[in-house]
Image (cartoon, grey):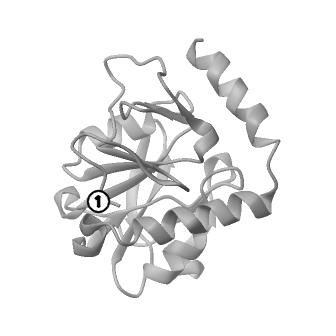
Amino acid sequence: MDKKELRQLIAQYKQNYSAAQKAGWSSSLFQKLENHPLFLQAHTILLYHSLPDEVQTHKFIKRWHPHKRIVLPLVKGDELELRYYEGEDSLQTGVFGIKEPTGSLVENLHEIELSIIPGVAFDRSGNRLGHGKGYYDRTLARLQAYRIGVCFQFQLFPHIPVEATDLPMDEVWTEQGCVFSGTQCSR
């Protein structure tokens, strides 16, 4: 199956589940992930402001914003610009209908210690299938942060097609917990 077919298949799968199911799975995933040693240690974390069909981050961002520096991406041309999340009032609707941060620009990318990244699909080797624009691959190549991909269990495949520019995740998590790690899952 090529990338386009896999994206279409996942879009069909997503229609089989209610918003309440996806919210419950998201909550379960983040309840597990917030006990990860790297999450507990990290001061600055790259997250994303989720779309309705993605692993839901809104409550997680609000919960941890008082305790950690949360960084969110916004689309600027062909790149992602990284800005600090400064509260719900600092979000505006941007490209693709995604709420994007208006907070201050992250000047030192090396201060981001952990990246929590969405994907259309992941495989059990840590490979990620995005939407095909390459935004995250180009951005993650500039960071030294540990990469954790998050998805629903139905978005996990034994193998997905990859190209040389596709960056693998260090770990992949679903509502069931860690399903891939380059070393061993930290549950």
Closer-to-camera residue (41/135): 41
Residue 77 in the image: x percent, y percent?
A: 48, 39
Q: What residue lies at 44% left-to-right and 37% top-to-bottom?
A: 135
Res. 181 image quadrant: top left
Q: Position of residue 115 (x, y in %)?
A: 34, 55
Looking at the rendering, in which quadrant would you find the C terminus?
bottom left
| Residue at 63%, 55% in the rendered image | 98
Report the quarter where the N terminus lies.
top right
- Which residue is at 28% across, 74% downward? 40
* Residue 173 appears anywhere in the view: yes
Identify the residue shown where x is 57% and y is 32%.
131
- Relative side of 56 to 139, left or right: right
Give the residue type at disc 1.
Leu
Against 59, is 145 above or below? above
Give coordinates of residue 152: x percent, y percent. Answer: 60, 48
- Of residues 85 and 154, which is closer to you in this image? 154
Residue 29 at x, y = what percent? 52, 62
**Residue at the disc numbered 1:** 114
- For the view shown, which residue lies furthest in the top direction? 1
Q: Which quarter of the picture shows residue 109?
A: bottom left
| Mark 1, other Cα within 10 Å: few <14 / some 14–19 / many ≥20 | many
- Taking depth in this image into account, of 158 and 91 the one nearest to the observer is 158
